[in-house]
Image (cartoon, rainbow, N blue to C red):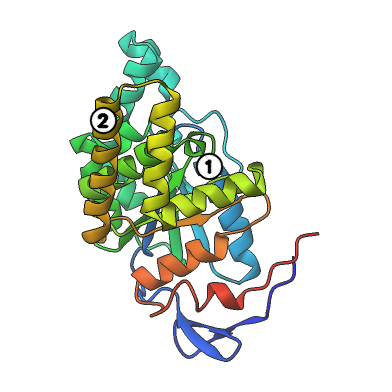
Amino acid sequence: MNLRTVDHDLRSDVEVLDGRRIPVSTQDGTTPPVVFVVGTAGAGKSSLVTAFQRWARFLEVDVLAINLDPGAERVHYDPEFDVRDLVSLSDVMDEYDLGPNGAQILAADLVAAQAEDVFEEIEGISGDILIVDTPGQVELFAFREASSHLVQVLGQGMACLVFLFDPMLSQTPSGFVSQMLLSSIVHFRLGLPTANFLSKSDLLEPEVLERIMEWGRNLDVLEAALYEESTSQRMDAATTGQRSEFAIGQLRMMQHASIVPGLVPLSSESEEGLADVLSFAQNVFGGMSDARDGFAGDIEHEIG
């Protein structure tokens, strides 16, 4: 992978990319801004954290990782803090005689109850960005009050959210709409700036990828696809119309409220979209005025 030269300006906390000064972290002596990675189980959260941390090192951007999933069997990134050192899922199952699902819920609550202790572990660490690998079950992270408290404590008012669309679920119109709705609900629950990424895009055939991206760009095309899907499932005309009308109505409402910020292809294998993740974070944290067309466009990737 070849990248354009990125130099450090030692006089201030900025990056210089091709002669342009780009702030990364301006919080001297405090915790860096936080990027929470959220998505359904198997969406590629841990893979993104691993790839993003490795890729950012080539830019000399200091990305620190945190694992908040007590049920993770292993991680392939270097965590600054690993919640498994605080709460072990297997220990919770044994101590409270719970199955995996019940143990995940209790473990999430136990972690949130110790949010201040977690923050003390990372407070004052030196870095540009903290990227957080969240539990596989998105409902545990987003829909429980304890988790909202954890986000507030760790984020300290400087946090954003990357939501990963599962590529398999995204291949049908109804699956695509469901994930857009889930993303908006997570955004509403946590109240953080949110960007949507189509994870594992390298696994999709080019025509399938283009169709999904077109659904994200053009609601009229998505509406037609929903009608066609409903018809193929032999739903009656009334059900077909109500289903599509509901889905499109929800999406148009979210777009009008600027809740859904679009969809970006992302691949942890080919590194496509990683520059967009960094640009989104820098834009949120005051690094750039034009995230999509600025920094991301100036980074050249050559895989090989």
Residue 184, given in percent of the width and then of the height, sits at: 28, 47
Residue 270, given in percent of the width and then of the height, sits at: 68, 54
Name which residue type carries label 2.
Asp
Give the camera-side residue of 230 and 31. Answer: 230
User: Callout 2: 10 Å neighbours few (<14), some, many (20+)?
Assistant: some
The residue located at (33%, 27%) in the rendering is 107
Q: Is residue 70 left or right of residue 47?
A: left
Q: Is residue 133 left or right of residue 7?
A: left
The residue located at (53%, 46%) in the rendering is 199
Give the camera-side residue of 61 and 261. Answer: 261
Q: Which residue is mark 2?
A: 109
Placement of 220 over or under 59, stated as above or below: above
Q: Which residue is mark 1?
A: 46
Q: What is the count of numbered marks? A: 2
**Most extreme residue toward the right, as rendered?**
304
Name which residue type carries label 1.
Ser
Residue 44, given in percent of the width and then of the height, sits at: 53, 41
Residue 78, given in percent of the width and then of the height, sits at: 57, 49
The residue located at (44%, 35%) in the rendering is 85
Provide the secondary structure element on which disc 1 rests: helix
Provide the secondary structure element on which disc 2 rests: helix
Image quadrant holding the N terminus, namely bottom right
Q: Is residue 26 visible?
A: yes
Q: CA distance from mark 1 to mark 2?
A: 21 Å
Image quadrant holding the C terminus, namely bottom right
The residue located at (37%, 50%) in the rendering is 121
For residue 284, which numbered disc appears in the image?
none
Q: Is residue 23 left or right of residue 298?
A: left
Placement of 14 over or under 75, stated as above or below: below
Q: Is residue 162 visible?
A: no
In which quarter of the view is residue 204 placed?
Answer: top right
